[in-house]
Amino acid sequence: MRIGEVADKTGVSVRALRYYEEQDLLHADRGPGGQRHYADAAVSRVRLIQQLYAAGLPSRVVRDVLPCVDSVEKTAPPALLDQLEAERVRIDQKITDLLAARDRLNDVIAISRDPDSDCSHMR
């Protein structure tokens, strides 16, 4: 599949796909004219890369994680596991913070929609 097709299927820009290649996160074969051709698996790979980026992992960590995902054994070196566990703790804290922010927004919305309701829990 060509780069534009991968971009369309994943919602990622062509520029981002080229960046992923530069970072050695994504690979494409080249046709005779130099055009990129991706395997069908590129779509799920790009989605995984996007998820890892959205979680706040930098390119170097994503690059280290991808071989573990690709591996039959699905194992990671101990140092990488330590780093991933630290990232998981950070993500869990971010989730907690986001849920608290959502709850506060829900309170503001509820009070705004019904000003006569009891808002003592917001103090």
Image (cartoon, helix red, strand yellow):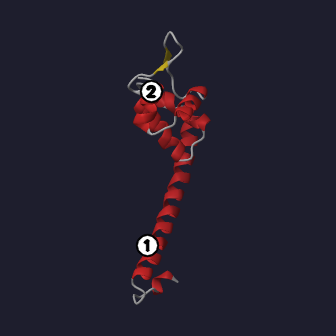
What count of labels does the image hold?
2
Q: Is residue 123 left or right of residue 1?
A: right
Above or below, comparing residue 120 to residue 108 in the picture = below
Across and down, in percent, residue 7 comes to: 46, 33
Dot 1 lies on which element?
A: helix
Q: Earlier in the sequence, mark 2 or mark 1?
A: 2
Q: Residue at x 44, y 75 (%)?
A: 109
* Residue nearer the viewer, 25 or 29: 29
- The answer, for residue 25, to whether it is visible in the render is yes
Q: Quadrant of residue 19?
A: top right
Q: Position of residue 83 (x, y in %)?
A: 58, 41
- Residue at label 1? 106
Q: As rendered, which of 52 and 83 lies closer to the eye?
A: 52
Q: Residue 65: which disc? A: none
Q: Is residue 21 above or below residue 115?
A: above
Badge 2 crowding class, 10 Å Cα cut-off, few under 14, some 14 to 19, many 20 or more, is few
Numbered disc in front, either 2 or 1: 1
- The answer to which of 48 and 16 lies nearer the viewer is 16
Residue depicted at x 61% and y 34%: 60
Residue lying at the far bottom in this picture: please name it: 116
Q: Residue drawn 51% across and 36% down?
A: 13
Asked if 32 appears above or below 85 in the picture, the reply is: above
**Is disc 2 placed on a helix, strand or loop?**
helix
CB within 8 Å, label 2 to label 1: no
**Residue 25 pos. (x, y %):** 54, 29
Find the distance from the CA under tag 2 to the CA under tag 1: 41 Å
For the residue carrying disc 1, how many other residues have a C-alpha within 10 Å: few (<14), some (14-19), or many (20+)? few
Residue under label 2, please give it.
70
